[in-house]
Structures are given as C-alpha cells and as structure tokens.
Image (tube, helix red, strand yellow):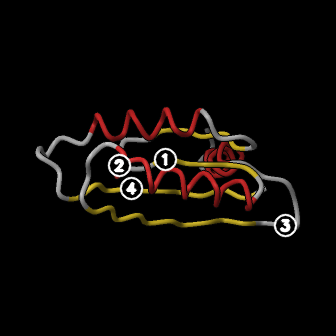
Amino acid sequence: MAIAEVTVIPIGTESTSLSAYVAGMQRVLEQQEGVTFELTSMSTIIEGELGDIWKAIAALHEAPFMCGAKRVSTSVKIDDRRDKAGSSRQKLQSVMEKLGQ
C-alpha cells in the first residue's frame, strides 16, 4: 500500500480563502474507491493501492476547475514501500515509540 501527500492550490480565484475549495475536494475524495484519506492543515494524506491513489489525485486536481478556478497547481509526494505493510498511522507510531511516548 502506498501513501501520498497531496496539496492542491487553486489559482485565479476571487478570494484568498480556499476553504470552500478544500471542502469540495474532500467531498470528491469521499467518492473515490480504494483509498482512505486524512485532511491536515496543509495537505491531504491518501492511502491505498498506487493506481487508486493516482485516480484520486486526478479527481482532486480537476475539482477546483469545476468550482471556477482558472488555474490549479498540484504537488504530490508518494511513499510506496513494498517490503512490508504500512500506513500513515504506523509511521507516526514508529516515531512516537522512538521518542518514548
């Protein structure tokens, strides 16, 4: 299973506030099959099989255009570990254990 961090930035909007776009993108993610996701203050974490993640990213990238954005910039980081199963929570837990928490 892969983990992706995705940041989608609508450009050419009428306001500097992007929360309405973010809410719309979260609704798009709810409709995606084969992935789980978590919204953070700066990005969205998506977990699943790589093919499903790419489909979700494509849908996310398209969503701001459907809401009136004139330009969209999307950044993606992918952690695709294949030697053992992992998750975003597992990665955090590993660090917390090393911190003695």
Quarter of the figure with residue 12: bottom left
Q: Where is residue 32 in the image (x, y as percent from the top left)?
A: 65, 41
Q: Where is residue 41 in the image (x, y as percent from the top left)?
A: 36, 42
Question: Do the numbered discs 2 and 4 sit on residues whose CB atoms are within 8 Å?
Answer: yes
- Helix, strand or loop at label 1? It is strand
Q: How far apart are marks 2 and 1 (CA)?
A: 15 Å
Tell me which amino acid carries mark 3.
Answer: Arg
- Helix, strand or loop at label 3? It is loop
Question: Image quadrant for the C terminus?
Answer: top right
Tell me which amino acid carries mark 2.
Answer: Pro
| Closer mark to the observer between disc 1 and disc 4 | 4
Q: Which of marks 3 and 1 is nearer the N terminus?
A: 1
Q: Position of residue 80 (x, y in %)?
A: 73, 66
Question: Image quadrant for the N terminus?
Answer: bottom right
Question: Do the numbered discs 3 and 1 sit on residues whose CB atoms are within 8 Å?
Answer: no
Mark 2, residue position? 64
Give the residue at x 17% y 50%. Answer: 13
Q: Is residue 9 left or right of residue 4?
A: left
Q: Earlier in the sequence, mark 2 or mark 3?
A: 2
Mark 3, residue position? 82
Question: Do the numbered discs 1 and 4 sit on residues whose CB atoms are within 8 Å?
Answer: yes
Q: Which of marks 2 and 1 is nearer the N terminus?
A: 1
Quarter of the figure with residue 3: bottom right
- Helix, strand or loop at label 4? It is strand
Q: Residues within 10 Å of mark 4 (few under 14, many from 20)?
A: many
Q: How crowded is mark 3: few (under 14 residues within 10 Å), some or many (20 or more)?
A: few
Tell me which amino acid carries mark 4.
Answer: Val
Mark 4, residue position? 8
Q: How far apart are marks 2 and 3 (CA)?
A: 33 Å
Q: Which of marks 4 and 3 is nearer the N terminus?
A: 4
Q: Distance between the residues labelled 4 and 3?
A: 27 Å
Mark 1, residue position? 44
